[in-house]
Image: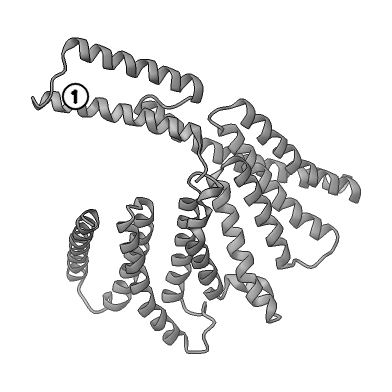
């Protein structure tokens, strides 16, 4: 797996903070007491180490700094979205004044300038928040440019555009180690893979948003291939796994609960019943696998999807059959039962 020095440095800083808290707790419980000389030596060593890590890798040395870093990541995403929106508005503002060559040049200049920003920021900024912002802008403006150029040249809106769009994003993500960019690009890749099914049958590719089986199948292929993406960048396997889980379970959840989104040549109610019978074992199997592998985020995604499915099914089956107090009482009982089952599964997973 690719090694990210900054993430390794942050893990070491987190380890030091955890060690300090645990040592304080052991002292409070009268389990271990260091001599004043030992305590001073350990504290001085940790302070020197944290100062070096902060100087070389700009790590978060406290929980407060960690919260601020998370805020910076959110601000980077919002800033990228705002910048892409600004570029879109600018293009629309000056569009009518430009000829075709100038229009194409303007559209291609935005992602190229953003890529230059990614490289410059990545070279000068250790945290890569600004580089990440430029990477999102590069992908967003490139996808916008592809769509606009097709429109300018009066070309058909082909599903083939999805493949270079996904490839561009994956290339940026792999080059600089951006997991969010990878997740977005894999989402586009899932759409591209699903579109092949419809294009091969002569059906307009946007039908993939109306008939969801190809999306679900392609997402689960991404989920199965996620472990092979680890060597491309640290955390890429986890990002791909979560993307596959969200898209695959999301599509399967809609197939099980929404009429008219299935390709199956059955009555809508029959198709829904079939996918309802499929959803539960698939979700339980994925949840068990996530718990056994200590994948906290994956467990949360699967558990949320399963909870939504059970809630929708419960409302559909019993809303008109039970009084309000009985409806919510049974719902609370189901929630407590789910908590008990998950706790037991977690304990078993931890002992294997």
Q: 245 or 77, which lies in front?
A: 245
Q: Residues within 10 Å of mark 1 (few under 14, many from 20)?
A: some
Q: Residue placed at 38% from the left, 24% from the top?
A: 61
Q: Which colour scheme is used?
A: one colour
Q: Residue placed at 49% from the left, 89% from the top?
A: 266
Residue 79's x, y, as percent?
A: 59, 37
The residue tagged with tag 1: helix, strand or loop?
A: helix
Q: Residue placed at 68% from the left, 56% from the top?
A: 165
Residue 339's x, y, as percent?
A: 21, 59
Q: Which residue position is annotated with label 1? A: 24
Q: In which quarter of the image is residue 98?
A: top right
* Side of 305 where 241 appears, left or right: right
Q: How many numbered callouts?
A: 1
Q: Residue placed at 20% from the left, 63% from the top?
A: 341
* Side of 227 where 304 appears, left or right: left
Q: 244 or 174, which lies in front?
A: 174
Q: In this view, does 319 lie above or below 342?
A: below
Residue 300's x, y, as percent?
A: 35, 55
């Amino acid at each position: 797996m690719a090694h990210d020095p900054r993430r390794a440095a942050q893990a070491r800083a987190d380890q030091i903070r955890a060690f300090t808290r645990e040592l304080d707790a052991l002292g409070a419980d009268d389990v271990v007491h260091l001599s004043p000389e030992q305590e001073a030596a350990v504290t001085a060593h940790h302070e020197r180490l944290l100062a070096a890590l902060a100087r070389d890798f700009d790590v978060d040395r406290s929980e407060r700094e960690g919260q601020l870093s998370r805020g910076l990541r959110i601000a980077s995403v919002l800033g990228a979205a705002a910048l892409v929106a600004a570029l879109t508005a600018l293009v629309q503002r000056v569009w009518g004044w430009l000829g075709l060559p100038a229009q194409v040049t303007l559209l291609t200049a935005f992602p190229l300038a953003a890529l230059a920003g990614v490289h410059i920021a990545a070279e000068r900024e250790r945290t890569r928040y600004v580089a990440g912002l430029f990477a999102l802008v590069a992908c967003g403006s490139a996808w916008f440019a592809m769509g606009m150029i097709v429109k300018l040249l009066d070309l058909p809106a082909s599903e083939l555009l999805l493949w270079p769009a996904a490839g561009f994003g994956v290339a940026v993500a792999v080059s600089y180690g951006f997991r969010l960019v990878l997740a977005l690009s894999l989402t586009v890749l899932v759409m591209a893979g699903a579109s092949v099914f419809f294009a091969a049958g002569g059906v307009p590719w946007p039908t993939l948003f109306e008939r969801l089986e190809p999306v679900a199948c392609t997402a689960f292929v991404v989920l199965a291939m996620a472990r092979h993406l680890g060597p491309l960048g640290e955390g890429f396997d986890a990002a791909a796994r979560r993307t596959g889980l969200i898209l695959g379970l999301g599509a399967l959840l809609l197939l099980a609960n929404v009429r008219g989104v299935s390709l199956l040549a059955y009555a809508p109610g029959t198709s829904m019943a079939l996918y309802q019978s499929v959803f539960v074992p698939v979700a339980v199997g994925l949840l068990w696998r996530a718990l056994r592998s200590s994948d906290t985020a994956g467990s949360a995604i699967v558990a949320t999807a399963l909870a939504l499915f059970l809630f929708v099914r419960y409302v559909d089956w019993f809303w008109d059959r039970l009084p309000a107090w009985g409806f919510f009482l049974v719902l609370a009982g189901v929630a407590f039962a789910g908590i008990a089952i998950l706790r037991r599964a977690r304990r078993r997973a931890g002992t294997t």
